[in-house]
Image (spheres, rainbow, N blue to C red):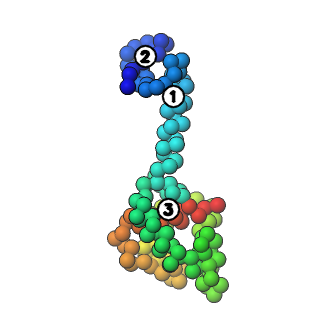
Amino acid sequence: MHVRVHPSLKNAEEFALAEDLPEDLDMKSFAVLLVAASAALISGCGKDGGGGGDSIDPAAQAEASKIYMQRCTTCHGPNGGGDGPGAADLNPKPRNLSDATWQSSVDDAYIEKIIKLGGAAVGKSAAMPPNPDLATNEPVVKALRAKVRSLKK
């Protein structure tokens, strides 16, 4: 790596670190490049569908996918629409997890709480069961929350 000081800089503190950057790259272009690279990194970090910037462990993500298919799709459906095969006889109907308005109205802590403690814990239907086996398994709970966030349309 080498340091190249742009000719328009007034003092040594204003410099650009560069490795394989074009000679004619000015500070404005460098700043745009830096912002774009940062945005690309941030958008790919743990958002696995929208959640909070946490990175999700691949093993926890695999376990969460398995749990979602086994426990959640019966009522919420595979795409989170609240239209699973068990939803027909439920009143109230299961939450449409893909609803953008609902998604923006709840924070990650709420989703994680309902995953662990069930509907009654947040003033919703007791038909949404708790998952006490997940109470201390934060990586899988975060991965399930990310799964829920990924369903947003």
Marked residue nearer the N-terminal end (3 or 2) = 2
Q: Quadrant of residue 15?
A: top left
> In the image, what residue occupies the spot 60% across and 84% down?
86
Residue picked out by circle 3: 146
Marked residue nearer the N-terminal end (2 or 1) = 2
- Whether residue 114 is visible to the viewer of this picture, yes or no, is no
Q: Which mark is residue 5?
A: 2
> Disc 2 residue type?
Val
- Residue 6 spot, x, y in % from top left: 47, 16
- Residue 53 spot, x, y in % from top left: 46, 52
Nearer the camera: disc 2 or disc 1: 2
Secondary structure type for disc 2? loop
Secondary structure type for disc 1? helix
Label 2 CA crowd tier, 10 Å (few <14, some 14–19, many 20+): some
> In the image, what residue occupies the spot 54% across and 24% down?
28
Residue picked out by circle 1: 31
> Disc 3 residue type?
Ala
Marks 3/1: CA–CA distance: 31 Å
> In the image, what residue occupies the spot 51% across and 37% down?
37
Above or below for 93 versus 45: below
Label 3 CA crowd tier, 10 Å (few <14, some 14–19, many 20+): many
Marks 3/2: CA–CA distance: 43 Å
Q: Specify the farthest residue to the left.
A: 136
- Residue 88 spot, x, y in % from top left: 65, 84
